[in-house]
Amino acid sequence: MSQARPPAVLTIAGSDSGGAAGLQADLRTFLTCGVHGLVAVTAVTVQNTLGVHDRTDVPARIVAAQIEAVADDMGLQAAKTGMLASAEIIHAVARACDKAGVGRDAEVPFVVDPVAASMHGHPLFDDAGLAALRQELLPRATVVTPNLDEVRLLTGIEVTDRERMREAAVALHGLGPRYVLVKSGHLVEDPECVDVLYDGETFTELPGPRFATPHTHGAGDAMASAFTAGLARGMEVAEAARFGKWFVSNAVEHSYPMGAKVGPVSAFWRLAPDPFA
Ligand SMILES: Nc1ncnc2c1ncn2[C@@H]1O[C@H](COP(=O)(O)OP(=O)(O)OP(=O)(O)O)[C@@H](O)[C@H]1O
Ligand SMILES: Cc1ncc(COP(=O)(O)O)c(N)n1
């Protein structure tokens, strides 16, 4: 029997009944990246490939208790957030992360994926949630990983090209995270898909092809989870970002149709042998 202990990584996220995004995507990514996944569930969504049809939020004190229970018992090598649902939950997460030593100035790296809406456009928190995210979580983040809609909500900047991505990264860095990773999936006129990492001084481009598939549900979660797994495995931030980009590029390339509309990105490609190859 193996005595080796994999790194433990916590996702603080909502459940997607469709299995494409949310904590389901995070745990699947963690498994294939060789880390043990822990979960603090924030909300249960009634979701399929057509959209988010209903949801219920988990009481904030139960979200915090989940974080404290696993951090105290198992110890964390990294943590990430996904859907946080409300200002009250964000407040509880910020306090619990401080207690657990998770954050930009603490021992455990903290990846904040500022999930504001599902890819179908359904909001996953309200204006109070956005303000709490800006005030309480961005200053605690080792890395924040917005898509272009989240960039607009957080900074007011409408990104139309790579130059504006850099401008947005600088504005986001001013809100307090150590690093900013601006994701390029929504820049659909660009023939490539080049994400940008910024540390306050230097821009690092994360290049990759743009695959012509409509099935990208869960791409953002897969990117942020693989990035977080890389940090937990001891990679430097830029190396972990490149690992995350490599993981999600493959996941999008191997995405598949499922249901009536937008299918999920794949983690199967990382299993050897791929059961569906
Ligand atoms: N068509 C594509 N081909 C290759 N990579 C892509 C494609 N679309 C997105 N990506 C990559 O997937 C990651 C997520 O990008 P995106 O900007 O779409 O974030 P998101 O909106 O949070 O994701 P989603 O809503 O699809 O889960 C990024 O690393 C991006 O480069
Ligand atoms: C529970 C949950 N968390 C996150 C997302 C965002 O993912 P996407 O942008 O792919 O819809 C989602 N749709 N549902």
Image: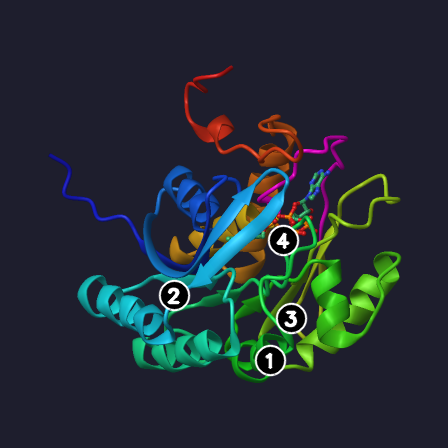
**Residue 232, image x and y in percent?**
39, 57
Q: CA distance from mark 1 to mark 3?
A: 28 Å
What residue is rendered at 54% in x and 50% in y? 221
Taking the image as shown, residue 135 lies to the left or right of residue 46, namely right
Q: Which mark is residue 118?
A: 4
**Where is mark 2, residue-wise?**
58
Q: What is the number of the mark on residue 128?
A: 1
Query: Magenta stretch?
Result: 205-219
Q: Residue at (85%, 39%) from the top-left corner?
A: 191
Q: Amino acid at mark 4?
A: Ser
Q: Quadrant of residue 94?
A: bottom left
Question: Please, what secondary structure does the residue beneath circle 2 have?
Answer: loop
Mark 3 Cβ and ligand 1 under 8 Å apart: no
Q: Position of residue 38 (x, y in %)?
A: 32, 55
Q: CA distance from mark 3 to mark 4?
A: 27 Å
Mark 3 and mark 2 lie on one chain; the one further toward the N terminus is 2
Work out whether residue 83 or residue 253 is closer to the camera in this orientation and state it: 83
- What amino acid does circle 3 point to? Asp
Most prominent secondary structure in the magenta stretch?
loop
Alpha-carbon span between mark 2 and mark 4: 18 Å
- Determine the image quadrant of residue 253: top right
